[in-house]
Amino acid sequence: MLEVHNLVTGYGKAVIVQGVSLEVKPGELVTIIGPNGAGKSTLIKAIARLIPTFSGEVRYNGVNITNLPPDKLIEIGINYVPQLENVFPNMTVMENLEMGALKNENAFERNLARVFEIFPILEERQEQKAKKLSGGERQMLALARALMSDPQLLLLDEPTAALAPNLVTEILKIIKTLKEKEQLSILLVEQNARKSLEICDRAYILVMGKVARTGTGKELLSDPELGKAFLGA
Ligand SMILES: Nc1ncnc2c1ncn2[C@@H]1O[C@H](COP(=O)(O)OP(=O)(O)OP(=O)(O)O)[C@@H](O)[C@H]1O
Ligand SMILES: [Mg+2]
């Protein structure tokens, strides 16, 4: 579904991501973990077309999307949720959801019902300004807003950043549900290495802009070397 071949990207003249290849198959939940500054956000931003690709290729359903304008991604079924500033703080929950549905107004009612089923708290808070939500609720709104565009592939950058451990678990559980119940394909960047390996199908470990290891979540979780380096074991 998503294929990244030898992607090189960065900022200005600074090369941050140094030739990364990865793949997300239909219905897969794939996670990218790695230390701070490894280039995880940079990589996912390049896939989401927000920063230029220096070299390499991104393909989606067999089509080369390496140079597609970012606003076209939603039309082809890809939705990116950034690490920061992923909701409109001065708009209400409902207005945020409406914004998410702009490219897909026909399915508004159906998507809204689905989103409220997954996130009942958002239905209760629909008239509240997004800035009044708790951190966890705000992340739920960011995910919900993405779902309003009826995506096939979600690109999520640290949806659990700065959340308390119980909320991290809850959000990751919801993300797994999106894969299982909604058949979404998901590329998930995560700081919580162990928890994300537990829910993912496969993972890539990014270190200094390169893929250091890849494997199934299970394989990586049971790797003693990795335990020491990344999982705090
Ligand atoms: N807008 C920018 N301009 C220049 N350099 C940047 C920019 N954003 C990030 N960088 C640099 O790129 C490198 C990788 O940053 P990136 O945000 O991709 O890391 P990350 O793996 O997402 O880290 P974290 O886990 O902290 O989110 C860092 O050295 C960072 O300083
Ligand atoms: Mg990041």
Image (spheres, rainbow, N blue to C red):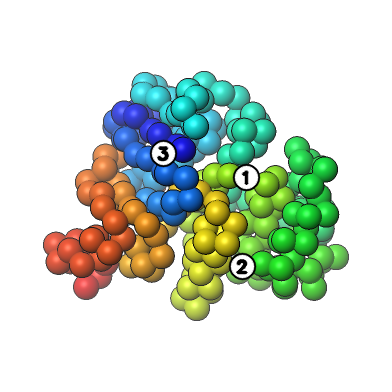
- What amino acid type is highlighted by mark number 1? Pro
Picture disc at residue 135: 2
User: Which amino acid does the dot numbered 3 rest on?
Assistant: Leu
Q: Secondary structure at mark 3?
A: helix
Nearest to viewer (mark 1 / mark 3): 1
Q: Which residue is mark 3?
A: 43
As helix, strand or loop, the secondary structure at mark 2 comes to helix
**Contact check, label 2 and label 1, Cβ < 8 Å:** no
Q: In the image, which disc is placed on residue 151? A: 1
Mark 3: give few (<14), some (14-19) or many (20+) Cα within 10 Å.
many
The answer to whether mark 3 is within 8 Å of ligand 1 is yes
Q: Nearer the viewer, mark 2 or mark 1?
A: 1
One can see residue 52 in this view: no
Residue type at mark 2 is Gly
Q: Secondary structure at mark 1?
A: loop
Circle 1 residues within 10 Å: few <14, some 14–19, many ≥20? many
Position of residue 65 in the picture relative to residue 10 (left or right): right
Residue 106 image point, x, y percent: 82, 43
- Tell me which label, 3 or 2, sits earlier in the chain: 3
- Front residue of this view, candidates 183 and 95: 183
In the rendered view, does 151 fall on the left or right side of 171? Answer: right
Q: Nearer the viewer, residue 227 or 104?
A: 104
Camera-side residue of 120 and 139? 120
Where residue 58 sits in the image (x, y, percent)?
Answer: 43, 29
